[in-house]
Structure formats: C-alpha cells, structure tokens
C-alpha cells in the first residue's frame, strides 16, 4: 500500500476531528456563553442542537451528492463553508446570530463526514487495511468528541468564548491546501440526477420528528404540537421509503436494511451517540458549576475520557478478531451502561472522582460500539454506493447525538426548573429556573446567606436532573446491549468473512 495513501488518511482525519469536536466543544463553553449572551433556555438548547440537527438532516443528501459530483470536491466545498461559518460564530453578537452560524456549520459539516469515510473506502481496498483505516477514522471521531471540552477549556482560560469556533479556521486552511495533493478524487460511475423530492422528504422526516421528541421531553408530556410534528415526520418518512423502493438509483438503498448486521450497526451507532453526547453535556457543567472548577481544570479532569475513547477505538479491531462483533459490541454497551448508571449517582459535594471514573467507563464502552458499527456499515456497501452507505451510518450517529442533547438535555432542564421554581423565594427573579449558570449569576448579587441558599438549591436541582438524564441514557444502552448483538449475530451467516 503506497505510503501516500496513509498520508491521505491523516489529512482526512482533520475534518473528522473538527466536526465531531464541534458537537461537544460548546459543552465546556456554554456556561460562559450563557453569561455573555444571556440566551433563553430554548435558545441555549438550539445553540447546542441546531448544528447536529442540520448535520443529521443533510448527511444522506450530501453522501449521495458526493457520489455524483466527486467526493473530494464536495469535501473541499464543505470545508470552505464550515470555516466561514466558524468565523461568523466566533464573532456572533447575539444568541440569534450564534444559532444561525451554528446552522451554517451544520450544513458544511454534513459534506465532510460522508466524504471522508467514502474516500477511505476507495483508498483502502484490502479489507484488513480498511478495518485499520476505519479504526483510525473512528478514533479521530471519538477523540474529537472527547477532545472538544478539553480544547474548549484551554481556549477559555486564555481567550474569549468565540475562540472555541475560531480554532477551526487554521485547520480548515490546512485541509484545503493538503487534500488536493494527497487525497485522490472519486465519483460513482453510475451517477444520475439527484432526486430533489427524496431530498426534501428526508429532511421533512428528520427535522419534525426530532423537534417533536425534543418538545415532548422538555414538557415531560406529549403536547398537541409535538404529536402533530411527530405525525408529520412519520408521514414524510413513510413517503420517503416508498419513493426509494421505486427509484432505480435511490437516495437511500433501503435493501441494505434487510441485512440484520447492517440494521444492528446503524441502530447501535445512533443509541451510542445518544447516550454519550447527552451525558457529556452534563459532565462539563457539573465540573464547572457544581464542583467549582475553572474551564481549564475541568478540561484536564475530562482527559481520561479522551484516553479511554481513543484507546478503545484502536483496540476494537484486535478484540473483534478474537471475540467477534456481537460479543464486543454487547460488552461495550454493557460497560457504557454501567458507567452511565454510576454517573447518575453524582453527589452535590465531592463527586469529582466518581465523575471522572464513570465518564471514562462510558467512553471506553461506547468507543468500540462506534468503531464496529462503522466497519460493518462500510463493508456492507459496494464501492460506488459507499458515500450513501457511510452517510447512513453518520446520519444515525449525528441524529443520535442531536436527540441525546435534545431529549436528555430537556429532561434535565425540566426537572431542574420544576425543583428550583417550587422552592425558590418569590422575590428571586424567575430567570434562576432557566439554568444552573443563571441561578449562580443571580446568587452572586444577593447577600451572603441568601446567595448560599439559592446556590445550594440550584446545585441540588441540577444534580437531580443530571441523575434522571443519566438513568435514561443508561437504560437506552442496556437495550442496545441486548438488541444490537442479536442483530449482528443473526447476520453472520450472510457475511461469512466477518465474525
């Protein structure tokens, strides 16, 4: 295998690290942004969510577009959009501007992820080398997710909050310079006109469904608007699937889901990201606002998570050769579930060690789930449809991440708000119910005794919400530990070359 291809792989890890890092980098910065821009609770969740929502909504379309116009070309176009949007986010003067910039980052990011994975599929034809390359790709993906809060903490220690976005720009410039020289172009020989109606239906299926689940979780009950949104999303999804069956070159090859291995891998990727990203949102806030750590120290405290994620991503290929996909996948989900349930027991005082250890177990369990899911999905697709297949895997992961922030974030916020507003004195501003950061800000302006009471009340309410969200994520992983290995095991006879 020419060395240049491995250099090309190194270049392709740059956008993977950036796009995954941007899913979580705000977790460490959101307390500072809340203080500086004073967004409403809904705006805060949209600042966190809109990137993942558009990423998930557009990945399928962008994967197919790359198959048609050239995957490297799409990668470079998306990188330019992502870099420009990152600059806009860095200097956003208000919550609305930041939400808009994050949306544009999601559009650019949607072109990067499927392009990188499908290019790897074509650069590494040998199955053993491809598995190692995908392991490196997944380590970059998982490492970026874990690296986000750490990089954010380092930047916030020295610069203003916008630096967490501006850091993307030099990396994007490096990608734009190196990719044309080290990464070969590839496009499908069977390219055809992109079906616009399928694109619109896929978008109409994903976004209303995500919004409905987010709204229902935030209200802790299915509202009429949420039910209507869910019905609209399901209807659009059914129309989308029916149309794909009739198209000669569909946007989504529905036939891939007939294989239990493929279905189990896609489901596992979504559930893994749902739990990981949703809990990391709480971890950064717990370390800063409950334990009282600075952004830099909080980032250092999260370093074991990054080590466990990256190490297990690389080790996964070794474990799967010895034990097979179903056992490694199920064991990973079980370890992550145990870590999640331990995380749910975080106390208000002296919980630093438990937070670090439980988070490391979560990362160590979820990392092989993501690695093996990606490997199975990419190996299931023919080379000329690898962009679309890899987009399905990434859509599951990004949709899971967006839902994790929306659902687990909304559960925690709703429980926090109800506990605080039930017990706070009537003369305290209602803004304390929006977030722990807002409550701490109000407490700083009160007399010492009242400040201590309000801060203690808010921290207890926050840990209650954290516990409820973590238990929900843990139960999701328990289900994944049972269902996904069964699907992977059922599909082994159809794929004798893969354990």
Image (cartoon, rainbow, N blue to C red):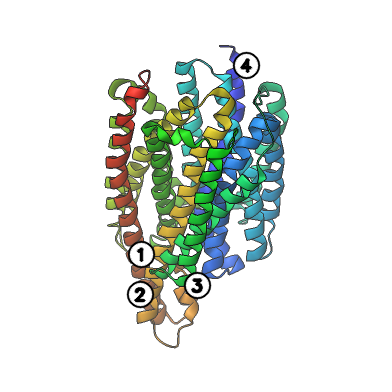
Residue 19 is left or right of residue 312, and the answer is: right
Which sits earlier in the primary sequence, circle 4 or circle 3?
Answer: 4
Q: Which residue is mark 2?
A: 419
Distance (Cα) linking label 4 and label 3: 53 Å
Q: Is any part of residue 431 visible from this angle?
A: yes
Mark 3 or mark 1: name the one nearer the start of the chain: 3
- Decide which of 147, 301 is in the foreground and name it: 147
Q: CA distance from mark 2 to mark 4?
A: 58 Å
Q: CA distance from mark 2 to mark 3?
A: 18 Å
> Residue 251, position in %: x, y?
58, 38
In terms of secondary structure, where does tag 1 sit?
helix
Foreground pick, 84 / 64: 64
The residue wearing badge 4 is 4
Q: Quadrant of residue 317?
A: top left
Can residue 151 be seen here? The reply is no
Query: Which residue matches tag 1?
Result: 465
Q: Residue at x 27, y 57 (%)?
A: 345
For the N terminus, the image quarter is: top right
Categorize mark 2 by other alpha carbons within 10 Å: few (<14), some (14-19), many (20+): some
**Which percent across, then down, holds residue 449?**
38, 81
On-image quarter of the C terminus: top left
Q: Please identify, in this view, whether the residue under mark 4 or under mark 3 is nearer the observer.
A: 4
Label 3 neighbourhood size at 10 Å, few (<14), some (14-19), many (20+)?
A: some
Q: Earlier in the sequence, mark 2 or mark 3?
A: 2
Say the numbered circle drawn on residue 491.
none
Q: Position of residue 155 (x, y in %)?
A: 58, 49
Q: Which marked residue is nearer to the observer: mark 3 or mark 1?
A: 1
Q: Identify the secondary structure beneath mark 4.
A: helix
């Amino acid at each position: 295998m020419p060395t240049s291809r491995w250099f090309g792989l190194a270049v392709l890890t740059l956008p993977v690290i950036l796009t995954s890092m941007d899913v979580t980098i705000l977790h460490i910065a959101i307390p500072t942004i809340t203080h500086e821009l004073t967004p409403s609770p809904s705006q805060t969740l949209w600042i966190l969510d809109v990137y993942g929502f558009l990423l998930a909504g557009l990945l399928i379309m962008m994967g197919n577009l790359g198959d048609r116009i050239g995957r490297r070309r799409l990668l470079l176009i998306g990188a330019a959009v992502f870099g420009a949007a990152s600059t806009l986010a860095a200097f956003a003067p208000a919550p609305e501007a930041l939400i808009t910039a994050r949306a544009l980052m999601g559009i650019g990011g949607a072109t990067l992820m499927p392009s990188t994975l499908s290019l790897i599929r074509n650069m590494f034809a040998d199955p053993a080398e491809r598995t190692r390359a995908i392991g490196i790709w997944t380590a970059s993906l998982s490492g970026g997710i874990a690296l986000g809060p750490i990089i954010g903490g380092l930047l916030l220690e020295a610069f203003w909050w916008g630096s967490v976005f501006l850091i993307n720009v030099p990396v994007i410039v490096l990608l734009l310079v190196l990719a044309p020289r080290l990464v070969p172009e590839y496009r499908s020989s069977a390219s055809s006109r992109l079906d616009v109606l399928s694109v619109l239906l896929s978008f109409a299926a994903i976004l209303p469904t995500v919004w409905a689940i987010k709204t229902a979780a935030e209200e802790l009950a299915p509202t009429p608007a949420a039910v209507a949104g869910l019905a609209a999303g399901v209807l659009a999804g059914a129309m989308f699937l029916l149309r794909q069956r009739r198209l000669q070159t569909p946007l989504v090859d529905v036939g891939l889901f007939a294989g239990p291995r493929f279905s189990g891998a896609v489901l596992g990727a979504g559930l893994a990201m749902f739990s990981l990203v949703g809990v990391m949102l709480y971890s950064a806030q717990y370390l800063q606002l409950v334990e009282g750590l600075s952004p830099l120290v909080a980032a250092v405290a999260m370093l074991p998570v990054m080590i466990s994620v990256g190490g297990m991503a690389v080790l996964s290929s070794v474990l799967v050769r010895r034990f097979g996909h179903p056992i490694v996948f199920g064991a990973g989900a079980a370890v992550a579930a145990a870590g999640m349930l331990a995380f749910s027991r975080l106390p208000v005082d002296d919980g630093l060690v438990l937070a670090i250890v439980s988070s490391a177990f979560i990362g160590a369990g979820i990392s092989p789930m993501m690695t093996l899911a990606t490997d199975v999905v990419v190996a299931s697709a023919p080379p000329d449809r690898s962009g679309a297949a890899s987009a399905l895997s990434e859509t599951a992961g990004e949709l899971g991440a967006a839902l994790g922030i929306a659902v687990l974030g909304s559960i925690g916020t709703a429980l926090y708000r109800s506990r605080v507003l039930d017990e706070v004195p009537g003369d305290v501003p209602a803004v304390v119910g929006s977030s722990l950061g807002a409550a701490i800000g109000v407490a700083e302006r009160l007399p010492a005794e009242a400040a201590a009471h309000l801060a203690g009340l808010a921290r207890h309410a926050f840990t209650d919400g954290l516990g409820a969200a973590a238990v929900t994520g843990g139960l999701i992983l328990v289900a994944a530990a049972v269902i996904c290995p069964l699907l992977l095991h059922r599909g082994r006879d159809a794929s004798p070359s893969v354990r």
